[in-house]
Image (cartoon, rainbow, N blue to C red):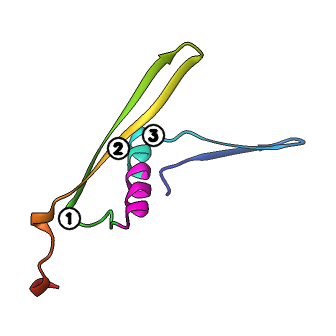
Amino acid sequence: MSEIKIDTSRTNTTTHRAVVSSEAINRLMFEEICKQLGLDPGAENIGFSTRINNRTMSYGTEIEAIVSVTVHHDAEPQASEQ
């Protein structure tokens, strides 16, 4: 993934830091969920939406991603098309 730039510095420890764009976060989440579901994220009949929520809790802020993966069954290849 060339769009993720990683900076590395070394003293007595090595620290790696990456700033990941919201677009890359959305894509990574989508791809991971498709992998867990056994779906091909590149299939034309698969769509997704992602929403990032920040919630203030008594102990601090909680951040969560809500990812919806939609399989459009009417657009699936038919057995005669495979």
Q: Position of residue 53 (x, y in %)?
A: 40, 28
Does residue 16 show up magenta in the picture?
no
Q: Which mark is residue 67?
A: 2
Rendered view: 33 above or below 52: below
Residue at point 60% right, 16% down? 59
User: Quadrant where the C terminus lies?
Assistant: bottom left
Structural crowding at the residue carrying mark 2, measured as other residues with C-alpha within 10 Å and reported as few (<14), some (14–19) or many (≥20): some
Crowding around mark 3 (Cα neighbors within 10 Å: few <14, some 14 to 19, many 20+) is: few
Q: Position of residue 60 (x, y in %)?
A: 57, 17
Which secondary structure lies at badge 1?
Answer: loop
In the image as oriented, which residue stretches furthest toward the top? Answer: 58
Alpha carbons under labels 2 and 3: distance apart:
16 Å
Q: What residue did someone put label 3 on? A: 21
Earlier sequence position, callout 1 versus callout 2: 1
Is residue 15 rendered to the left or right of residue 82?
right
Which residue is under mark 1?
44
Classify 19 as above or below 45.
Answer: above
Residue type of the residue flagged with mark 1:
Glu
Disc 1 versus disc 2: nearer the observer: 2
Which amino acid is tagged 2? Val
Alpha carbon distance from label 1 to label 2: 18 Å
Q: Which residues are magenta?
A: 28-38
Which one is nearer the viewer's eye here, 74 or 50? 74
